[in-house]
Image: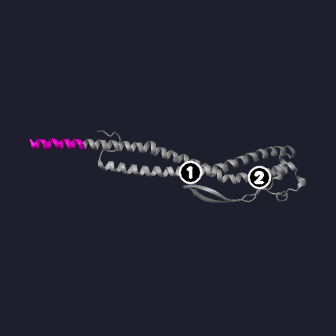
Amino acid sequence: MSMGHGPAPTRQNLIGLERRLERVAKGTALLRRKREALVAELFRLARPAATARVSIAERAATAYPLLLEALAVEGYGALRAVGWPGRELQVDIRQASVWGIAVSELLSRPPIRRTLAARGTPPPTIGPVTGATATAFEELTELLLDAANREALLARLAEALSRTSRQVNTLEQRLGPELHAQRTGIRRTLDEREREEHLRLQRLLQRRVQ
C-alpha cells in the first residue's frame, strides 16, 4: 500500500506519530487555555475602555469648537504666544507581561490641568474663551494619557488573541487531522502486512503437514 508523501509504514514511524499527536494535543490544550485567558482579559478591559473612549469623544467635541472660537477671537499668532513656552510631561512607565505579551504600564503622570497663574498668563492678556480652550485641551490630554496604556494593551491582546486562534485552528483543522490520517494509513498497512504474513505462515504449515 502506498502512503503517498507521508512517512514510511513502519512501527518506528507509527510510534513517532503517536508521540507527535500527544504533543499536538497538549499544545492545543495549552493554546486553548491561553485563548480563554486572553478573551477574559479583553472583556475585563472592554468596559472601562469603552467608557474612556466616550469621555474622550465628549471632551474633544467640546475642545475643538472652543479652539475654533478662540482662533476667531484671538487669532493664530496670539494663541501661539499664549501657548509659549511649551512644557515637558514626564511619566513613569513599567514594563509588564500578560501571558508572555510584553506591555507597558503607566504608573504615574503629572497633573495636566493648571490654573491661570500656573500657565503664566495673567487674566487681562487672554479672553475667557482662550482660558476655556486651554482647560478643555488639558483635560483631553489627561484622558488620552490615562487611556493610552489600556488602549495599547487592548491592541496587543487582540493581536495575540488573533494569532493564538490561528494557531489553534492550524493544530485542530490541519496538523491534527493530517497526523491522524497518516497514523491510520500506517496502521492499515501494518495490519495488512501482518495478515499477509499470517496467511503465508499458515500456508507453510499446511504444506509441512501434507
Alpha carbon of mark 1 to alpha carbon of mark 2: how far?
A: 32 Å
Label annotation for residue 38? 1
Q: Check disc 2 and report the residue beneath it.
A: 139
Element class at badge 2: helix
Q: Position of residue 119 (x, y in %)?
A: 82, 57
Residue 198 located within the stretch drawn in magenta: yes
Q: Nearer the viewer, residue 147 or 25?
A: 25
Please tell me which residue is depicted at 66% across the width and 49% down the height of the picture: 47
Please tell me which residue is depicted at 42% across the width and 45% down the height of the picture: 176
Residue 62 located within the stretch drawn in magenta: no
Q: Do the residues labelled 1 and 2 touch (CB within 8 Å)?
A: no
In the shown orientation, is residue 27 left or right of residue 60?
Answer: left
Q: Position of residue 100 (x, y in %)?
A: 54, 55
Q: Main secondary structure of the magenta part?
A: helix
In the shown orientation, is residue 95 left or right of residue 86?
Answer: left
- Magenta stretch? 194-210
Q: Position of residue 48 (x, y in %)?
A: 67, 51
